[in-house]
Image: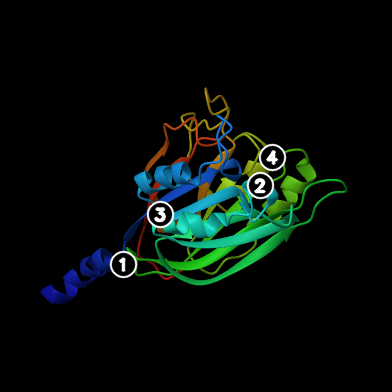
Amino acid sequence: MRLLALTPLIMATVWACELRVLTWNIHHGEGVDGKLDFARIGRVIRDAKPDVVALQEVDVRTERIKRRDTIRELESLTGMRGIFGASMPFQGGGYGNAVLVNGTVLGSRVFPIAASEGMEPRSILMVEMRPYRCSQDLAFLSTHFDHKSEEDRMAGAGIANLPISLPAVLAGDLNAPPDDLVVGTILQQWTTATKGSNFLTIPVEAPKHQIDYVFFRPAKRWTVVEAKVLDEAVASDHRALLAVLKLLPGDE
């Protein structure tokens, strides 16, 4: 009887896991000093010790990054597995979102966000994965909503709120402040890891606004251990946001 009484505690120890999530709009690798520097981007990521990273404004083999493959270079610099999801063709290559994973990638899919006339196409990249430090499959979504069209941002929120069977994390640049209708719509299905006023990410030199976020669902499966904005103000025009989450045991 004593052994049976201890079993739930043992299972909780085995199945609960901590997940370090980083989200960052990397401005195609160009810093505010005008330098294209993937090594600097990689160093910031590596120093944060993430399990998974959501990246936005990612170029792959475009003219402005001299036909370089951002994903392959970041894989080499960080030791993580990279997945790219193009939102649109651009300058002979692709432009969109990416995910870096310290773990096993089980599959990925790009969900296009319908663009209004004259607006830039956007998308959500979803990666099914199992982090090395977890015994649970997860869905991880990286996205970048349009900065001009509220209609397009709302369309993105609708896609993000579609049912997901796995425990999930959504991270990215929503181009909307916390009190915006778009964020409120996301919060109908997701819980924010960055509640409060301490998560300002733009402008990078002296941040005054939060438009970058980490969300999770279902709420009862996750707790927030820590969340902070990284103190790096040169490598991109956004500051990176780190959230440390704990996934709790459960059947969902």
Q: Which residue is mark 4?
A: 181
Q: Which residue is painted at 65% across and 37% down in the image?
A: 176
Observer-nearest of 143 and 56: 56
Q: Which residue is mark 2?
A: 185
Q: CA distance from mark 4 to mark 1?
A: 36 Å
Observer-nearest of 185 and 88: 88
Q: Nearer the viewer, mark 4 or mark 3?
A: 3
> What SS does tag 2 mark?
helix
Q: Are marks 4 and 1 in contact (CB under 8 Å)?
A: no
Q: Which residue is painted at 68% across and 51% down in the image?
A: 157
Task: Rate crowding at label 2 as few (under 14), some (14 to 19) or many (20 or more) other CA atoms within 10 Å.
Answer: some
> What SS does tag 1 mark?
helix
Amino acid on which the number 3 mark rests in the picture? Thr
Q: Which residue is mark 1?
A: 15
Q: Position of residue 120 (x, y in %)?
A: 78, 48
Amino acid on which the number 4 mark rests in the picture? Leu
